[in-house]
Image (spheres, rainbow, N blue to C red):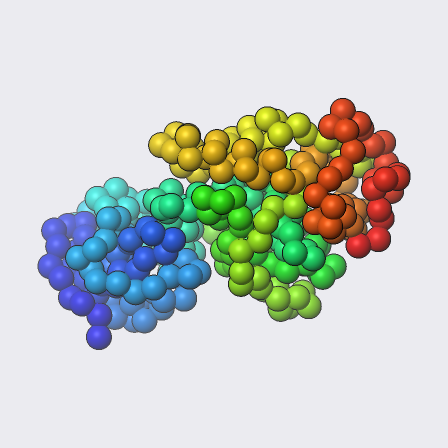
Amino acid sequence: MPDVIGLQSPTMAAFVLAFECYGARVGVSTNEASIFDLLPKYLPVKSDLISLSAVENKFTLLKGDPASSSGRDGAYCLYDSECLVLSTSDLHVALEQLASELDAVVALEASPSLFVHAGVVGWRGGAIVIPGRSMTGKTSLVMELVRTGATYYSDEYAVFDRQGQIHPFPRPMHLRTGELGRWQKITAESLGSHVGTGALPVALVVATQYDPRARWSPKLLEPGQTVLRLFDNTVDALRRPEDAIDIFARVAAGCVAITGARPSSEQVAPFLLALCAQTTQSRAFAEPSECYSDFNLDPLPTNP
């Protein structure tokens, strides 16, 4: 049975659970037992239930609007502490928004891990990290890499430890459907692959975004540029700048990083897997000033 606590509006008397994920401690409450039963499947991956007294952040999903004199029984209202995040008549939309908010607060409050907005896959002992915010084509590229045989780690957050290694955050891949608040969820297994479980060293950083008119002509990034690209996409960069720079300097010293607008994922994925494999084996590459005009030019291999 869930805990039942009495709280002041808008966080009314509720069924409550609390969890810890990567050091972040979060509580989630609701005033409906039927909603409570659904909550575990919307928690962040790698969450462990904990005592309610240990939470540092609280979210509440209510059926009925406490701000309305009529109660609006058909509405579902999501709160972050006392702040209204969303009011909707669609429970699915409310739960998906809750899941997104929970992922985001874990990314912000994680310690000592550092979360970066990025897609991640594993390949032959190394990680490919694709930093970028929403709408840059991360998920489609991650999906194609996984479909080609890479191990799935994340389509939203790269989780770095203090040594600069990557840990999995393998929520299902989310593709926008065009309908507000609706996503198509895709698992690694449905693409013929699997989810990673262990930490990996970063072999390749790919700073790119989709452009249907682009011709794949990536340029190498110098270590300092690599640090800045990762830092720019770090969730908690402002509060932990020294940690971030130290971690990313370790990463940049041992990986290859490339940048450039890309065409379709199908055109780029084989190149990235081949380059990752080569980098993992040699931990060496060409001069940073060199630019490759086509993705199959030597010394870059074309077959993973």
In percent of the image, x 22 and y 70: which residue is there? Answer: 2
Task: Find residue 66 and report its horizontal and vertical position in percent.
Answer: 19, 51
Residue sitting at x 52%, y 44%: 164
Residue 87, position as x, y percentages in the image: 33, 49
> Taking the image as drawn, is residue 34 in sight?
yes
Relative placement, left or right, of 26 versus 292 is left
Q: Residue at horizontal 57%, vertical 39%? A: 251
Residue at position x 62%, y 50% from top? 127
Q: Is residue 153 above or below residue 112?
A: below
Quarter of the figure that contains the N terminus: bottom left
Quadrant holding the C terminus:
bottom right
Q: Is residue 249 above or below residue 269?
A: above
| Towards the viewer: 162 or 115 | 162
Say left or right for 172 vs 19.
right
- Vertically, is 219 above or below 92? above
Position in image of residue 220 (x %, y %)? 72, 31
Q: Is residue 134 visible?
A: no
Counting every numbered tag in the picture gives 0
Query: Where is residue 102 shown, x and y percent of the image?
Result: 37, 52
In front of the other: 28 or 127: 127
